Image: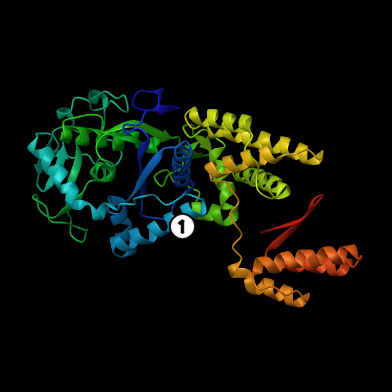
Amino acid sequence: MQVYNTMSGTKEPFAPARGGRVGIYVCGATVQSAPHLGHGRYAVVFDVIRRYLEWAGYEVTYVTNVTDVEDKIIAEAQRRGVAADEVAAEAEQQFMGAFRALGVRDPDHLPRATEHVDGMIELAERLVERGHAYAVDGDVYFSVRSFDGYGKLSSRSLDDMRSGARVAPDERKRDPADFALWKASKPGEPSWDSPWGPGRPGWHIECSVMAERYLGFGFDIHGGGADLIFPHHENEIAQSEAAAGAAPFARYWLHNGLLTLSGEKMAKSTGKLVGLLDVLAAHPPLAVRLFYLRKRYREPFDYSEDAVVDAAAQLERLRAFRRRAGGDGGEPDPATVERFRAAMDDDFNTAEALGALFDAVREGNRRLDSGEEAGALVGAYDVIVSVLGLAEPDADLADIAPDIGGVAARFGVAADEPAAAVAALVDARERARASRDFATADGIRDALAAAGIRLEDGPDGTRWHRE
């Protein structure tokens, strides 16, 4: 397995520090407002990486954080006239709901910054004691020139740097690139007691503390969007390695490319936004997931409504094949699985992996058309869609059970469970068609459609699924 390490700028063999165990930390959401489409990409990208590593036999511990105290959250709370923690809780719920709809599994640990402030104070104290940080009027700054490796992730020369994103210019700094570890609180802001007076942590120190708390120093994979390489990840490395007097803080740095809109970065700062919740309301969520996976994770790509519509059509083609095949898949076709593995071992190339999947579906449909055995291709299909998180979820009919019950009563069908009722209605429709009672057959089909159940007729019988 080869992974592209931003630190070296090359693909490297993947060799976890602890053999079969892998620790992954992904910088999560700053929860000041609802997620946009770009947030969904990082969540899906690293969910697939996690799933693939587990399928490949690794024991994975997956950690992603919630930044629930930060300048933008405070500004949004002040604009709305509510408490900062209310803004953060509301947005966190929106993020997590959207990610779950996309099929993203919950992390093993979901630490919030406000739950780890004591650790951030301790890290800042250690950096001050070691001469890597200094206090000014209740603020604490990291001295970038005290750390020889500063700039090694982003390949930047310190002398050429300017203050980066989220680093406010301040004449009290020894160097313009120095960044805040601790900020003295202003009236009305959230604050915690510290050796330097009441205040709150800077943004960068949060992830250093939470990553080491759950994975230990020198963990395997640190992930996030490419926009975090500088200054956020650069600053994480500096403060963590300076405090420990050792390297590396993380062994592999993986960054997903940014989603763009008309060629510009999708972000609140640019005003180029497509709301993730809006897209999920308009399209099948797993079609949005498939849209993300059609590009290799490191590549930036542009959003368009047409691209998501096309992904939805592709998803339906996948599902139509699996419904047509029915039953349990056979022993997976080794050539298809090996092609999938080779693609994913090449730095998680989901675009090539999807090529293996769609080729298997085309060949599977050809075999079904000609009456040949397709069980091995169905088995390979099941493996791939499971790893990519594209498997069709089991139909949950609880919320439409009364509607299905009404259809069953209308057509004289008795069944205790909604799924059994649907199956019985399908049988009743088949009997009506066989006796040329097309009015009844069409009535059952239309009534089920109105209840949210779609019937599909094929050469091997009728299958149903929830719309």
Quadrant of the image containing the C terminus: bottom right
Q: Is residue 379 visible?
A: yes
Label 1 SS: helix
Horizontal side, residue 118 vs residue 76: left or right: left
Q: Residue at x 83, y 63 (%)?
A: 430
**Which of the 4 image quadrants contains residue 414?**
bottom right
The total number of labels drawn is 1
Which is nearer the eye, 265 or 229?
229
Indicate whether 452 appears above or below 118.
Answer: below
| Vertical comparison of 208 with 279: above or below | above
Q: Residue furthest front?
A: 331
In this view, the residue in front, 282 or 177, is: 282
Residue at image x 76%, y 77%? 410
Q: Is residue 303 visible?
A: no
Tell which of 335 and 103 is nearer to you.
Answer: 335
> Which of the 4 image quarters holds residue 153?
top left
User: On screen, 328 above or below 155?
Assistant: below
Residue 3 picture quarter: top left
Q: Quadrant of the N terminus?
A: top left
Could you say where residue 273 lies in the image, as x and y percent from the top left? 48, 47
Q: Indicate the position of residue 71 as horizontal and vertical percent values.
A: 27, 51
Tell me the residue that label 1 is attached to.
Answer: 97
Drawn side of residue 134 relative to residue 230, left or right: left
Circle 1: residue type? Gly
How many other residues sit within 10 Å of disc 1, few (<14), some (14-19) or many (≥20)? few
Q: Residue 460, how many percent across, how many down?
A: 80, 50
Relative horizontal placement of residue 253, taking residue 447 as reference (left or right): left
